[in-house]
Amino acid sequence: MTQTDGHELISVIMPAYNCEATLEEAVISVLGQTYPHLELLIVDDASEDGTPDICRRLAEQDKRVRYIRNKVNCGALKTRITAADNAAGEWIAFIDADDLWMPDKLEKQLKLRDGTDCDIIYTASAFMDDCGNRYDWIMHVPEQVGYRKLLKQNIISNSSVLMRKTDYIRFSPPDESNGDMHEDFACWLGMLREGFVARGIDEPLITYRISARSSTGNKIGASRMNMNTYKYLKLGFFERHFYQTCYAVNGLFKYRHFR
């Protein structure tokens, strides 16, 4: 177990691409954790806006911030793997550069991890729009989710996850997926199928940003990526279409709260 000053070090992974408007607020929510023994790896995926300058400034201001820049745009999966390969901690957490954490997120997750047998710890999610206005709805989560239940709906938000670095690297799809599936969903499902345990904290310890750029076209693309995730997991024809129907129904229920 990697430690700093006698405490376990948690590595936080943040991919960043053209996110100058939201990056600093996301970083502040990480550095302001009540569990301070962390490193934040910001991997800039060859941004073309002011993201690199903000990253460099934040790294100069807080020694816990480590800045890595991809020479070319690689996509979210490869960017997260790059960060995981460079992470010093044995346990990693994820946050997107437009999302926010509550101050006690890591502290509560570590308490649950140390008191139970689990491999993935996730939380409920609150939501906001592009301008930071909060929605009233919260996506609640069960205390535990299994493989079959997760197939029906991915209730494990990427920005809420705490897990072992080695598990993430082992179960993430290969780079050849090229963003054609939900790689994080495939990772969680692959682990649960092999008997790993995922436990949740039903508190909105993260706030997920719903982009106004989400459109019908994007929903269709997300549905296609979901089906490709089932194909990657080698589900049979009827299984794929059954769970895809569940995905669509649950998606309609979820996104009606953001109209």
Image (spheres, rainbow, N blue to C red):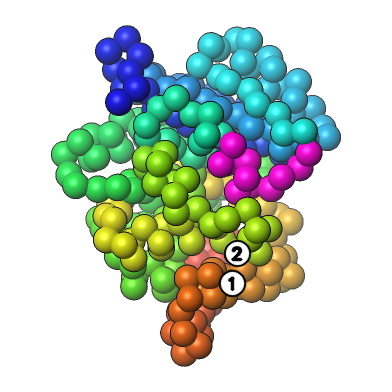
Taking the magenta stretch, the answer to whether it contains residue 95 is: no
Q: Mark 1 points at which residue?
A: 228
Three-letter amino acid code at the position of disc 1: Asn
Secondary structure beneath label 2:
loop
Q: Is residue 74 left or right of residue 167?
A: right
Q: Residue 168: percent from the left, percent from the top?
A: 44, 46
At x 23% / y 40%, what residue is drawn? 112
x then y, percent, for residue 109: 30, 38
Mark closer to the chain start, 1 or 2:
2
- In the rendered image of this protein, does residue 142 appear above or below residue 233? above
Q: What span is in magenta?
A: 72-82
Label 2 is placed on what type of residue?
Answer: Met
Tag 1–tag 2 contact (CB < 8 Å): yes
Where's residue 169, x and y in %? 47, 45
Label 2: how many Cα within 10 Å (few below 14, some 14–19, many 20+): many
Kindly identify which residue carries mark 2. Answer: 181
Does the stretch in magenta take in 80? yes
Label 1 to label 2, Cα distance in Å? 5 Å
Q: Quadrant of residue 113?
A: top left
